[in-house]
Amino acid sequence: MVERRLIWLAGIVLVWGGAIFGKLVALQVLHHQEYVKKARARQEEVVQLRAQRGPILDRNGHPLALSVPTEAVSVDPRNVPSIGFDSDLLARELHLPPPELFQRIKAAHDQRRGFFLIKRDLTPQEADDVRNLKLDWIHVEDGSERHYPNNQLAAHLLGGVDFEGKGNGGVEKSLENELHGTPGHADILTDVNHHGIFELVSAQARAGLSVTLTIDERLQFVAERELAAAVNEHGAVSGSLVVMNPYTGEILALASYPTFDPNLPPETDEEVAARSDHAVSVPFEPGSCFKVITLSAALETTRLRPESMINCHGGVLTGLPGGRVIHDSHGGMGIVPMWQVLAHSSNVGAIEVGRTVGREKLYEYVRRFGFGEKTGIPLPGESKGRLRPLTKWGSTSLESVSMGQEVSVTTLQLARAVSVVANGGLLVKPRLVLKLGDETAPSEPPVRAIKPDTAITMRQMMEQVILEGTGKTARLDGYTAGGKTGTAQIFDFVYRHYTHTYNGSFIGFAPVTNPAVIAAVTLNGTRGEAGFGAEVAIPTWKAVVTEALRILDVPKDLPDNPAPATEIAQNPKELNDLPIDLGSGQPNILEDTDDDEPAAPQAQAFVGPRLPVAPPAAPAAGTVPNFRGMTLRAVLAEAAAKGLSIQPDGTGVARVQSPPPGAVLHRGERIRVQFAR
């Protein structure tokens, strides 16, 4: 009996031992990897190590955006004792809405998440308050905060970052991949209460690249200051300004108003609207600035030259389809040289030039100047403007486009277009990024848009806008300059007519012979005659370009106190045999408007830029001979025989000269002679 019991007991022990052994085999051999994974899932956590965001600098290395050290608070939702009570406690210390924080922690708890970020960018006081709670399920960790040391400066260029540290506008968004860097990872071994025991960094975080922009912080400050002053002074709705190197396309300043502080989140609709970059994203009708393209196309595709006579019909153009009547906004001109059409901004004259060019060629050259397409600047939300295909042009579209209507452009596109004239005929791609890290950012080669001689001729005509025409107030101290005013009535798409609010613009370059800088200024939504381009945009353009020339240390090409411009024709009856129709009346502005500078009373000789030339060897002082009616060869022969220096313009026979015949010729003075057929 005893032996039987011992046998049963031995059997039970044997079976029990076999079961244990089998279980051990299953745990340690058959299912070892499976249980190791389960254990690691409970005991190990992988935490992402945030990479330091790269800084943004101006072209001189001055910081525009930096990441500064800060602290963040996180919790393990699985270990929060009481979500309701503890969320209220944290909300009070971190100045967060309690209901919202409760919902966020509860959602993370329901998802069995082991890490949840409560708030980053803690103030020192908030970090201390949380630490003083001495709760082991709350973790305060080191982090970084994006900071813009110059507040509003270059805000539209820089953009900002969201609560996750990702770019949400400007360069911060377009170059997110370069700035963000590569996050790292750390493996943390925890105990049963998920308290950290050991940490192993499996992948180090790599900081983002530094981004060096082409803008100059000093010039950007001046541009924003002058633009804000102009918008407020003239009651404009918004404004934009672009300063650019015409040869490289480097943006030296890009300003938009109204502006904002990227350090602060927007709280009102007005603050949200202020983040629109008007220089890049908001197109408008350019008005008379577009006449530069019309006349450039004429120089390239027709026989029209600066001295070619254009009939401006006294400033009134009738006979258009639908009974449309187009007026010049100032006293009408009669038959004048083409350079005066630009200088005095005649709508009617520009239309006559556009008709000579024709629809197809005008459209081609508008595209050549980069309109109707994005410039490719690395900023989000860039607009390509509006340029309808030829198949959608109306019966008077040729007339409208010739003077800058029925087409929409951005201020950046205008700056790019004037660069074509300034740099000798090349369409450049605007460049905003100078370097990525230590490497120079790649740039695209320019594309030929117009011939070099066309660009030089356009420079000369644009200089006359400042010397003789609608841009007289844009004269610079010590520098020659060329430019073009532009005013466009804003179209009301609801009532289908042009309003009495305007977009006033000015585009230009300096110096004339070798432009070092170009600038385009636009003020949107001005009212009355005070809203014309010459009134609102020129002072801003002049102040900014003057500062740009100083910063770039561009040599002056004029005396600091220049003498008045050379008088071309004291007596037009004596010096010009061409018949002039001065027109009559003062027509009212109906639907097409331009600058408010009075028209020239008579045709004048086209005067080119002040090119540096060597004076004649020993010119004798005396009186100016009469070259009128002589051919170019005969004029040059007589001038050579008398040791005179001649600057000829045009072809044919001599029509106008300066100084006039019989005037006293001083030693070293040149005689400008205008030829026409």
Image (tube, rainbow, N blue to C red):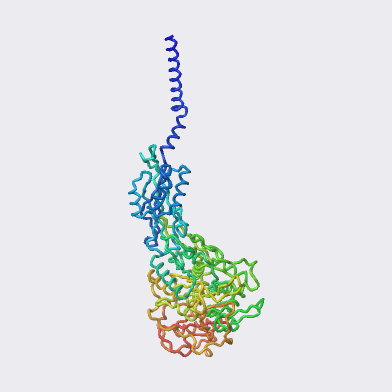
Above or below, 651 against 207 in this view is: below
Q: Position of residue 535 (x, y in %)?
A: 48, 78
Say whether residue 541 is visible.
no
Q: Which quarter of the figure is the C terminus placed in?
A: bottom right
Q: Which quarter of the figure is the N terminus placed in?
A: top left
**Numbered disc total:** 0
Q: Position of residue 511 (x, y in %)?
A: 43, 73
Residue sitting at the far right: 322
Above or below, 378 against 42 in this view is: below
Q: Nearer the viewer, residue 305 or 501?
A: 501
Q: Nearer the viewer, residue 196 or 603?
A: 196
Q: Nearer the viewer, residue 116 or 157?
A: 116
Say whether residue 494 is visible.
yes
Q: Position of residue 139 (x, y in %)?
A: 37, 46
Q: Residue at x 46, y 42 (%)?
A: 112
Q: Position of residue 321 (x, y in %)?
A: 66, 76
